Image (cartoon, grey):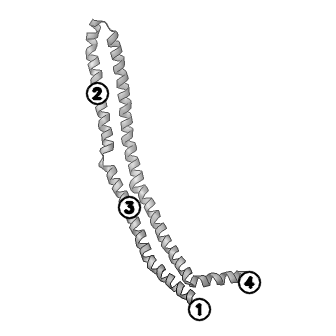
Amino acid sequence: MERRWEHTSSDALGQEPLGAAVRKFAAAQDVIGNAELVLENEKQVKFVKPVSALLNDRLAAVARSRRNVSTLRLQLDAIKSRFNSATPHRAEGMQVELEKAEDALCDAVEEGTKLMKGVVESPEVMRYLSDLVAAQLAFHEQCAHVLSELAPEIDEMQVTQEALYNTAKLS
C-alpha cells in the first residue's frame, strides 16, 4: 500500500509545475553533458594528441642535439687540454684539430638553437590551439543556446506555480 502512495505522489509531482521544470532542466543538462563529452573528445583528438606527438618528436630532436653539443664540448675540452700540455712543435700540428673541434661545436650549437626555435616558432601548435578555442566556443554557444531556451520556460512555470500557490492559499 505504501508503494502505491509513493508512485501516486511522484506522478502528481511530475504534473505539477515544479516536476515539469525539473524534467526540463534535467533534459537541458543532458544535452549540455553530451556536448561536454563531445568537447572532451575534440580536445583529445584536435589538441592534446597532435600537440603531444609534435612536441615529443621535436623535443626528442632537441635532446639529441643537446647530447651532441655536450659530447662535442667534452671532445673540444680534451683537445684543448692536450693542446695546452703539448710541446710547441706538437701544438702547431694540433692547431687544425682544435679549430675543427671548435667549428664542429659551433655548428652543433647553431643546429640546436635552430631546432629549439623551430619548436617555439612553429605555426602548427598555434593551429591546434586555434582548433581548441573553436571547439570550446562551439560548446559554450551550444550551452548558452540550450539555457537561453530553458530560462523563459522555467520563468513561465515559476509564474504558474505562484498562481497555483496563491489560488490554493485563498481557497
How many numbered marks are there? 4
Q: Are marks 4 and 3 in contact (CB under 8 Å)?
A: no
In the displayed structure, 58 sits above or below 88; it is: below
Local secondary structure at mark 3:
helix
**Type of amino acid at the residue the image marks with label 1:** Leu
Q: Percent x, y for residue 17?
A: 54, 83
> Which residue is disc 1 drawn over?
170
Q: Nearer the viewer, residue 18 or 170?
A: 170
Query: N-terminal of the two: label 4 or label 3?
Result: 4
Residue at the extreme bottom of the image, as rendered: 171
Categorize mark 1 by other alpha carbons within 10 Å: few (<14), some (14-19), many (20+).
few
Mark 3 surroundings within 10 Å by alpha-carbon count, few (fewer than 14), some (14 through 19), many (20 or more): some
Q: Are marks 4 and 2 in contact (CB under 8 Å)?
A: no
Marks 1/4 in contact by CB < 8 Å: the verdict is no
Q: Which of disc 2 and disc 1 is earlier in sequence? A: 2
Q: Which of the 4 image quarters holds residue 66? A: top left
Residue 51 appears at what percent x and percent y? 38, 49
Residue placed furthest toward the front: 170
Q: Which mark is residue 106?
A: 2
What element does badge 4 sit on?
loop
Instruction: Say which residue appears at 26% left-offset and 14% top-offset.
Output: 95
Q: Which residue is mark 4?
A: 1
Q: CA distance from mark 1 to mark 2?
A: 93 Å
Q: Nearer the viewer, residue 50 or 142?
A: 142
- Alpha carbon of mark 1 to alpha carbon of mark 4: how far? 33 Å
Q: Secondary structure at mark 1?
A: helix
Assign the C terminus to one quadrant of the image.
bottom right
Viewport quadrant of the N terminus: bottom right
Q: Earlier in the sequence, mark 2 or mark 3?
A: 2
Q: Position of residue 148 (x, y in %)?
A: 42, 74
The residue that appears at 31% across and 26% down in the rendered structure is 105
Disc on res. 135? 3
